[in-house]
Image (cartoon, helix red, strand yellow):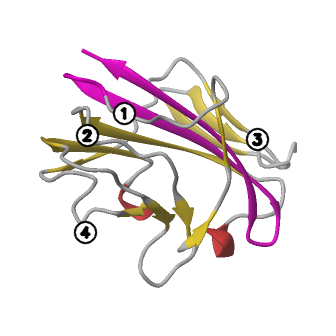
Amino acid sequence: SDNSMQFRTDDAERLRITSTGGVHFNNAELIERVNIVANKLSAATSVNIDLENGNVHHFTTTETTTSTPNIRVNSSTSLNSVMAIGDTISVTLITTAAAAGYSAQLTIDGSAVTEKWNGGSAPSAGGSSGNDVYTYQIIKTADATYTVLANVSNFA
C-alpha cells in the first residue's frame, strides 16, 4: 500500500491525497467559491475578510473611500492559528472600482503587516471604472509573522 487516500468514479482515480499531504486531481475541474458581497469593501461591515466564506471576495457596490481589509478565518478563529510556519494562502479581493476607493494596506488577525507590492509601491488611487482586483500571497514565516506579496490590477 502507498498510504494514500483515493477517490474514484467508474473505477477511474479522480483525486488522491498522498501520505505527504500532496493532492492530485486527475482530469477534473477545480471550482472555488466566491463570496459575493452586496456592499463595498470600505464599508465598516465588510472590512473583515472571513476566509471561512472562501478565498475570493467580490464587492458589488462602487467604492467611495480607502479601506484596510482584515484577513482572518472568522471572528473567533485567527489565520495564525490555522497556518503553520511555511504555509501559504492566496486571497483575492475584487472591488467595484472608483478613483477614491483603494486599499494600500491590509491587516491579518487585526495586526498590521508590511506588504511587498508588485511594481514596488502601494496603490494611491483606484481604477476609474470596472473592477479592481487585489491579490495577496500570504506566507507565514514565523508565529504571527508573514511575507505578503500584493498586487492590484484594474479590469475596465
Labels 3 and 4: the sequence-earlier one: 3
Residue contact between numbered discs 3 and 4, judged by CB atoms under 8 Å: no
Residue contact between numbered discs 4 and 1, judged by CB atoms under 8 Å: no
Task: Kindly identify the amino acid type of the residue bearing the numbered disc 4.
Answer: Ala
Q: What secondary structure is found at the residue carrying circle 2?
A: loop
Residue 125: which disc? 1
Residue 107 among magenta residues: no
Which of pointers 3 and 2 indicates the residue nearer the eye? 2
Residue at mark 4: 44
Task: Kindly identify the amino acid type of the residue bearing the numbered disc 3.
Answer: Gly
Residue 122 position within the rendered picture, expressed as x and y whole percent measured from the top left: 55, 37
Labels 1 and 3: the sequence-earlier one: 3
Question: Depth check: 112 or 82 in front?
Answer: 112
Q: Residue at x 41, y 80 (%)?
A: 75
Magenta-colored segment: predominant secondary structure: strand
Labels 3 and 2: the sequence-earlier one: 3
Q: CA distance from mark 3 to mark 2?
A: 43 Å
Q: What secondary structure is found at the residue carrying circle 3?
A: loop
Residue at mark 2: 100
Residue 141 among magenta residues: yes
Specify start and end residues of the magenta stretch as a single range.
127-156
When asked about the image quadrant of residue 63, the answer is top left
Residue 67 position within the rendered picture, expressed as x and y whole percent measured from the top left: 35, 55
Which of pointers 3 and 4 indicates the residue nearer the eye? 4
Q: Is 93 placed left or right of 144 in the picture?
A: left
Residue 32 position within the rendered picture, expressed as x and y whole percent measured from the top left: 40, 38
Mark 3 Cα within 10 Å, few/some/many (few <14, many 20+)?
Answer: few
Labels 2 and 4: the sequence-earlier one: 4
Residue contact between numbered discs 2 and 1, judged by CB atoms under 8 Å: yes
Q: Is 43 placed left or right of 82 in the picture?
A: left
Q: CA distance from mark 1 to mark 3?
A: 40 Å
